[in-house]
Amino acid sequence: MTGVLGFLFLALSFAGIVYTLAAALLAGRYRAIAPPLPREAPALTVLKPLHGDEPALATNLASFVDQTYPGPVQMVCGVQHSDDPAIDTVHALRDARKDRDILLVVDPARHGANGKISNLVNMTRHARHPLLILSDSDMAAPPDYLATIVAALNRPGIGAVTCLYHGRGQAGGWSRIAAAGISYQFLPSVIVGIALGRAQPCMGSTIALRRATLDRIGGFANFADLLADDHAIGEAVRALGLAVAVPPLILAHGCAEASLGALVRHELRWAATIRGLDRAGYAGSVVTYPVPLALLGLAIAGLSAPAAAIAGLALLARLGLAWRIDQLTGERAMSLWLLPARDILAFAIFVAGFFARAVDWRGSGFRMEKDGRIAARSESLT
């Protein structure tokens, strides 16, 4: 029995090597075709829900107003508490960019368990333009971001646009380790999923859609009790018979984890969310961990030449993929000598994700219900 289990882990690791090599190949081709420029530049509103003064928040926000886009751009920043530290950052940005249309909305109204969506409901009332682009506060965009998004949204049959992203540590060592999980684990898996037609992403990095489309799916309030609100918005758009486009543009996600505990809580929430959306797909993603699988195979089956070869190939494949992602994004998330330890940590969180029923989100605890909704832990979930 031990031999069979060891062989199983080694076989999974070998499958993971094949996946990793395919991911490296696809990542190298991801941005080979430059996105077209938009033929027109309609007026648009960028929605930025904020919560606290995150590292590099001022720089991240500025990247969305310092754009090459020639049309009118309004940025609406929203908070739910009058003492939110992000308010000072928005005031400073407005002072530094007096020629830009930047609005701050402070509104405590709550519309459901999801605080971000409540914030968006309050903010959207102040959006003046018919094209809306929602982006999380921890994202940084290149100067051609708005032009690329509008060009993608103008294509026939497109109802929304989203973007991939890589990790960027902004709060010390643990944040860089967190960034590596995004760059070297999450990003290649989505690239492969899109290439195979298996992934249909819609992510908080970017959700661009017309206000008319948002109204047809019930507005943001329709998603106020969902943990995976971004995914649900994408599903609602597709239910209208429209597609969600993913242009070859990669944003930078600023990671602010200052401790191992913060990193684990954040990634466990991601894991539990993905598991809740697609259990079979989540289980199948085990092949994205070839190094831990090979080590388990060695530990159970014992050292042998084939097992050692698989472990060595797994490590080389992962290092090659990380190097390819660095080339794609233009920056290194983490020192690559830490990659084996990072992969082991990621695998442990992956396993824990099968059992997580409660998650932490920006300091608040929630329990996950079977229909994908969330509720405060103090509430009864019978």
Image (cartoon, rainbow, N blue to C red):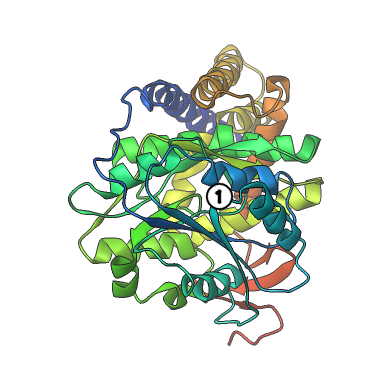
Q: Residue drawn at (59%, 77%), measured in percent from left and top? A: 113
Q: Position of residue 108 (x, y in %)?
A: 65, 80
Q: Position of residue 299 (x, y in %)?
A: 69, 29
Q: Residue drawn at (72%, 35%), measured in percent from left and top? A: 176
Q: Position of residue 243 (x, y in %)?
A: 26, 53
The quadrant in which residue 313 appears is top right
Instruction: Reply above or below: 345 against 324.
Output: below
Q: In the drawing, does residue 48 fall left or right of residue 90?
A: left
Q: In the drawing, does residue 308 fall left or right of residue 247?
A: right
Q: What amino acid is at disc 1?
A: Asp
Q: Residue drawn at (47%, 36%), measured in percent from left and top? A: 250
Q: Position of residue 44 (x, y in %)?
A: 39, 56
Location of the N terminus by quadrant is: top right
The quadrant in which residue 31 appears is top left
Q: Secondary structure at mark 1?
A: loop
Where does label 1 land, which residue?
A: 99
